[in-house]
Image: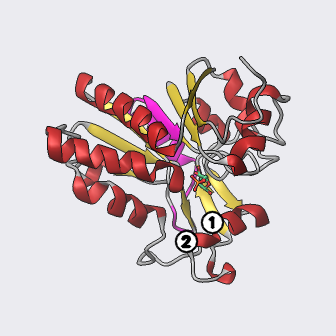
Amino acid sequence: MKIEIVKDKEEMARYISDYLVTEISNRTTLNLGCATGSTFEEVYHRLVEAHKQKNVSFSHVRTFNLDEYLDISDEHPETYKNTMERLLFNHVDIPTHQRHFPPSDEHAEYDAYDEFIRAQGGIDIQLLGIGVNGHIAFNEPGSSFTSKTHKVALSKSTRKANARFFDSMSSVPQYAITMGIQTIMNAKSIVLAASGKHKAKAVKHMIEGKIDESLPASVLRRHDDVTVVLDNAAAKHLKEG
Ligand code: GLP
């Protein structure tokens, strides 16, 4: 696990977006695993700027989002699909048919998403945030390390953390569909970003604690190509060096 500590959220976004622009420019195809959440908002903003100001083309990029809410209307601005459109897709040239989300209708075979990703050549770079309880995507503490894309009931702490995007706690969705931990581990490389002191405890456990299903992100230490980008606040509990 490679660890990069930068000053603040802005530097973190610069670091990640510079890396992505280089990869997008150097490759003829790129399968990008996309995360939502506030951590990546500035990263997407910078990608849009790169497209508009430096003519960086995204036409060969295929995206695979990590997760989506289930009990929410398609028109709601906070679905992850609508969020991705607002932040990135409406402003760059990724063709619509190259943007993918986990299947979210009630009767879907959710793990078909794993097969689909594999058939598309697998994910080259997976972007990941981390929840205050150490979740990755919506794999809550206790999720199996061998899980594929599946439906989850969101934990109270996750619903509380995401309540800021909704009018009230009662309108925060209760269920979501998420890539499983195995789905994420199948990515060829992973970039996890965390910013702010509220993430510091989860970050410390992920890097220094036991590799255990009680903290889903700890599994990433078993992957051989993970870069963790932290700002000073998120890194504050880590041992020196
Ligand atoms: C959300 C998302 C995750 C995200 C995490 C952190 O619930 N499902 O994919 O990484 O929580 O979110 P934020 O970046 O807003 O802190």
Determine if the magenta segment contains residue 120: yes
Where residue 218 appears, as percent x and y from the top left, is 74, 33
Determine if the magenta segment contains residue 238: no
Give the distance between the C-alpha atoms of the residues marked 1 and 2, in whole angstroms: 6 Å
Q: Residues within 10 Å of mark 2 (few under 14, many from 20)?
A: some
**Which span of residues is magenta-colored?**
104-127
Mark 1 in CB contact with mark 2 (< 8 angstroms): yes
Residue placed most toward the observer, 165 or 7: 7
Question: In the shown orientation, is residue 143 left or right of residue 60?
Answer: right
Where residue 103 appears, as percent x and y from the top left, is 49, 58
Q: Residues within 10 Å of mark 1 (few under 14, many from 20)?
A: some
Q: In the structure shown, which secondary structural element does the residue marked by tag 1 occupy?
A: helix
User: Quick check: can you spot residue 188?
Assistant: yes
Instruction: Tell me which amino acid carries mark 2.
Output: Phe
Instruction: Return the mark for residue 165.
Output: 2
User: Quick check: can you spot residue 155?
Assistant: no
Where residue 63 appears, as percent x and y from the top left, is 37, 44
Question: Is ligand 1 within 8 Å of the beta carbon of the residue shown at mark 1?
Answer: yes
Instruction: Tell me which amino acid carries mark 1.
Output: Asn
Where residue 43 appears, as percent x and y from the top left, is 40, 45
Q: Residue at x 27, y 49 (%)?
A: 48
Q: In the structure shown, which secondary structural element does the residue marked by tag 2 occupy?
A: helix
Quadrant assignment for the C terminus: top right
Instruction: Return the mark for residue 162.
Output: 1
